[in-house]
Amino acid sequence: MKRNDLILAVFPNFIDDVDKEGGYCLIQVIKNSVNLKESHMSSEKVILDNGSTIISNSRVVINGTTYPTANITAVTRRIKKEKKGWPILMILVGFVLFSDGMIGWGLASLALGILLLLRKASHFLVFSTAGNEVPVFKSKDENWVVELEIAINRAIIARG
């Protein structure tokens, strides 16, 4: 970079005091670098973008963490069902307490047991990379996790 280019970059109001040809070169270099960034960004095919989650052929952003699509070899969905033992026991205890005349404790135990029994399963999204598996996302919303899995599989295919 020539001295005049540096002056133009730092003090744009002094354009009259520097060599206009050097200034043009600097401006042309800046324009070319912006065009390179734009052309790089335009080659990115966004498959899903809802603000907090972005999935493209070059990257996956989930909960503020970016994963390069090139490092993801596969994506799988896992389900962890809630255990039913404790809720059933709470319901049985509630019936016993209710039948023994402890209506308040019996109703509380019944209500807690039913609430625990109605819990939804947890759905996990797991990335397979070259050496290991990385749990990436957890949700009770099965449809959202399935949508993410499909979009990430499309991004893996799109990256080529």
Image (cartoon, grey):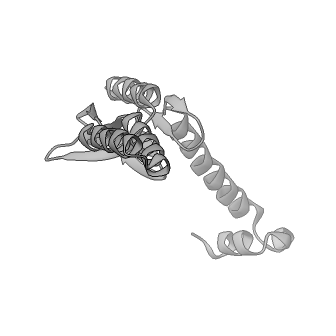
The residue sitting at 64% across, 55% down in the picture is 30
Q: Could you tell me residue 151's position as x and y percent?
A: 42, 26
Q: Which residue is the extreme one toward the left?
A: 131
Can you tell which quarter of the image residue 35 is in? top right
Is 28 in front, or is 155?
A: 155
Percent position of residue 31, x then y: 65, 49
Q: Which quadrant: the N terminus?
A: bottom right
User: Which residue sits at x=13%, y=47%?
Assistant: 131
Q: Residue 65 in the image: x percent, y percent?
A: 43, 52
Query: As rendered, which of 83 and 110 lies closer to the eye?
Result: 110
Please state the horizontal and vertical placement of residue 78, each as a whole percent of the image: 26, 33
* Image: 55 above or below 66: above
Taking 49 as reference, is 141 left or right?
A: left
- Quarter of the image with the C terminus in it: top left
Farthest residue, direction front: 101
Nearer to the camera, 73 or 9: 73
Horizontal side of residue 85 vs 12, given as left or right: left
Q: Quadrant of residue 19?
A: bottom right
Location of residue 82 with respect to 5 vertically, above or below: above
Q: What residue is rendered at 41% in x and 42% in y?
A: 98
